[in-house]
Image (spheres, helix red, strand yellow):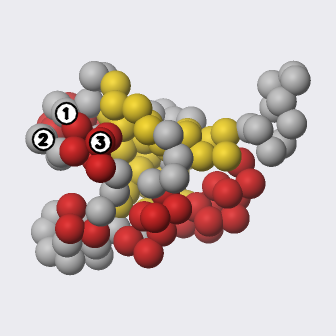
Amino acid sequence: MQSGQSPSTQTVTIYKAPQKGKGQKLMEEGFQSIDFPYNPPYLDGSCYFAGPNDRSIAEEFNQSYNDGILEVSIDRATYDRDFKPLEYRYDENDDCERIEVVVPQSLFPILNQFPRVLKPR
């Protein structure tokens, strides 16, 4: 924790590489069920993020999508309560275990409460 920050003000950032043409829409309108239907490529209707404070998975997908990386900053208490249980091991890269966060549509309203920024890369 950074000095001067209490646990309630600490944030966790997760990262999403939106499909081509979806980045600005997600930035402006947030995460909507219609954007993550129960058919390919979102077979389960969920939204997949690179885990806390590690952009590497999103950067890999952005090489194909080229629509930037959407960063969502969530306060630590909410992240630990609602999103941490959704963490899954993605793979290992250079002996570093990487985590993805699989957010179901039912949590989109909570996710949309938090600030997001779309970065070109």
Callout 3 environment at 10 Å: few (<14), some (14 to 19), or many (20+)? Answer: few
Q: Which mark is residue 28?
A: 3
Callout 2 environment at 10 Å: few (<14), some (14 to 19), or many (20+)? Answer: few
Q: Is residue 94 above or below residue 49?
A: above
Residue 114 in view here: yes
Q: Is residue 11 left or right of residue 100?
A: right
Q: Identify the mark nearer the N-term, 3 or 1.
A: 3
The C terminus is located in which quarter? top left
The alpha-carbon separation of the residues under discs 3 and 1 comes to: 14 Å
Q: Identify the mark nearer the N-term, 2 or 3.
A: 2
Q: Which residue is mark 2?
A: 20
Q: Identify the mark nearer the N-term, 2 or 1.
A: 2
Q: Which residue is mark 1?
A: 67
Callout 1 environment at 10 Å: few (<14), some (14 to 19), or many (20+)? Answer: many
Q: Is residue 120 left or right of residue 50?
A: left
Q: Residue 39 in the image: state x and y as whole percent.
A: 15, 74
Residue 88 in view here: no
Q: Which mark is residue 121?
A: none
The alpha-carbon separation of the residues under discs 2 and 3 comes to: 15 Å
Q: Nearer the viewer, mark 2 or mark 3?
A: 3
- The amino acid type of the residue labelled 3 equals Glu
Under circle 1, the secondary element is loop
